[in-house]
Image (cartoon, rainbow, N blue to C red):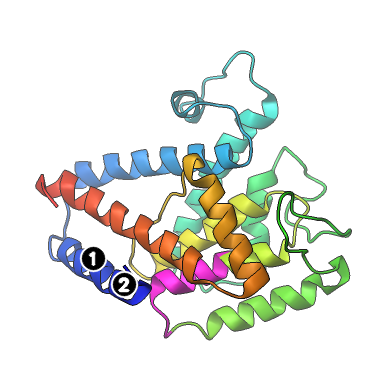
Amino acid sequence: MNNVTAFAEIDRLKNRLDSLRPLPENTVRTLHEQQVLEWTYHSNAIEGNTLTLKETKVVLEGITIGGKSLREHFEVINHKEAIDYVEAIVQNQDGLSEWQIKSIHHLVLKNIDSKNAGTYRQENIVIAGAEHLPPHFLKVPEAMTALIDGYQKTGLLHAVECAARLHVDFVGIHPFVDGNGRTSRLLMNFELIRRGYLPVIISVEQRLQYYDALDTAHTRGDYAPFIGLVADLEQSTLKRYLRVILGDT
């Protein structure tokens, strides 16, 4: 399925879901709780966090897991707080800014690397396993200004494409020394939620496909594979919601 066809199917599913509003309160609450849990687990697991899905749930409930590092616990707690912040931005109808991106990143690295939390990198880095080389650290502020300018001009694109491009372009800059992946997925879902779509979860099992699609966009300028990945995930998420609410697809 090409991306244009995928967008049409996504919008059909979204319209069907929207037609059912207001949705059952408890159903929405439990779906949201599951969504936050899976989003936190998979986003952290992609980056090497060893907590299982069940262990992540327990940490979110305020319980410490024996034998697991303090960092891994903070990664769970911080990610949940970052999701809450992203949802608050949407609720307040605030636009995306560099200050908000830094604030999201600060939450991601809070109590883990306070020195670099919310601060653009002051050194050059490489992305392990990727062909793409992020810009020199002195060019990061300029690149981030261009990112926001470009993002503000993508409003006519389908929400899925806009969200996917925001993710790709942010990761390409890699403006922070750590936490770029988690922050990029939060930004992608910010755009989806802001435009009335459901947030998507890139699973740890899709890590290779995910990295390959990112590298294709960065080295060849071909965003289609990454946009297609996000589109597939959005379709699956919408179908999941409809299946739970209606009992079918």
Instruction: State the SS at label 2.
Output: helix
**Residue 193 appears left or right of 175:** left
The location of residue 235, given as percent across then percent down, is 30, 59
Which residue is at the front of the view, 135 or 6?
6
Circles 1 and 2, Cβ within 8 Å, touching? The answer is: no
Q: Which residue is mark 1?
A: 14
Q: Nearer the viewer, mark 1 or mark 2?
A: 2
In the depicted structure, whether residue 106 falls above or below residue 59: below
Magenta residues span 156-167
- For the point 71% across and 50% down, the residue is 129
In the depicted structure, whether residue 65 falls above or below residue 169: above
**Residue 13 appears left or right of 86:** left
**Residue 146 appears left or right of 6:** right
Classify 10 Å Cα crowding around label 1: few (below 14), some (14-19), many (20 and above): many
Which quadrant does the N terminus fall into?
Answer: bottom left
Q: Which residue is mark 2?
A: 7
